[in-house]
Amino acid sequence: MKLPQLRIGNLRPKYPIVQGGMAVRISTAPLAAAVAEVGGVGTIAGTGMTEEELRQEIREARRLTGGIIGVNVLFAVKNFARLVKASMQEGIDFIVTGAGFSRDMFSWGRETGVSIIPIVSSARLAKLAERLGAAALVVEGVEAGGHLGTDRPLGEILPEVREAVDLPLIAAGGIADGKDAA
Ligand SMILES: Cc1cc2nc3c(=O)[nH]c(=O)nc-3n(C[C@H](O)[C@H](O)[C@H](O)COP(=O)(O)O)c2cc1C
């Protein structure tokens, strides 16, 4: 099966498959590096870590692979800015963030050359993210559970977002377990 090419800034992963950030030390360096090493996109979840712990995870992932590695931090956490800035200093490839929306992270991304990928569940937020300089978007519907503020399925939201923006879109939520019908 020919899969479409995913673009994240200048990055072109071999496969358009992104491993999600799962906090509470699930998406740490070994998982992210294993995915990146075989041509997917690895994500370290920084939520719940200290800045120093996250720096160590990033360094460990970089030691394990030369593949594409990003960091997910939920906007809602107290040390959000510190975690994002530390990740950028460590030379991470991208930042994914959800559970709220930071305008500031786009200027930090511009200053450091790190791609910003917000998680969105509406065309309205997608347009705002595009205007602010997002490199790509994760689009999640109700199947993803958690911190979304939507009760609409991905199959409804995704076409609206596709229509609204020109950015690469990463559909998420219920894909692997077949809950989503999109
Ligand atoms: C244990 C666990 C921890 C999670 N932690 C995070 C997190 O830190 N940040 C985040 O954005 N999403 C988090 N999520 C949500 C998933 O990443 C999100 O639901 C995923 O994109 C949905 O994909 P799937 O349903 O196809 O697996 C977590 C999910 C699980 C199960």
Image (cartoon, rainbow, N blue to C red):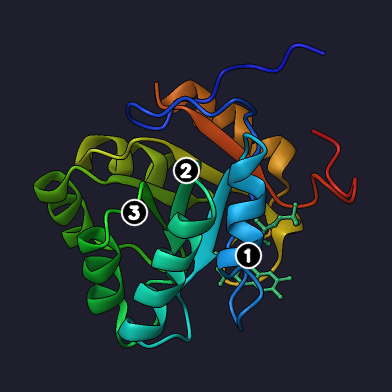
Q: Residue 135 lies in what quarter of the image?
A: top left
Q: Residue 50: give its label.
A: none
Q: Which residue is mark 2?
A: 66
Residue extending farthest right: 178
Report the front residue among 9 and 142: 9
Quarter of image, ligand 1:
bottom right
User: Disc 3 versus disc 1: distance between alpha carbons?
Assistant: 15 Å
Label 3: few (<14), some or many (≥20) within 10 Å?
many
Residue type at mark 2: give it.
Gly
Report the front residue among 49 and 138: 49
Label 2: few (<14), some or many (≥20) within 10 Å?
few
User: Disc 1 versus disc 2: distance between alpha carbons?
Assistant: 13 Å
Report the front residue among 2 and 53: 53
User: Disc 3 versus disc 2: distance between alpha carbons?
Assistant: 11 Å
**Residue positioned 15% across, 56% down in the render:** 108
Horizontal arrangement in the rendering, residue 129 relative to residue 48 (left or right) = left
Q: Position of residue 123 (x, y in %)?
A: 46, 39
Q: Say which element carries label 1.
A: helix
- In primary-sequence order, the first of circles 3 and 1 is 1
Mark 3 vs mark 1: give the one in front: 1
Q: Position of residue 124 (x, y in %)?
A: 40, 43
Mark 3 vs mark 2: give the one in front: 2
Label 1: few (<14), some or many (≥20) within 10 Å?
some
Q: Say which element carries label 2.
A: loop
Using the rendered image of the protein, determine whether residue 40 is visible from the camera's viewpoint: yes
Q: Which residue is mark 3?
A: 92
Residue extending farthest left: 111
Q: Which residue is mark 1?
A: 30
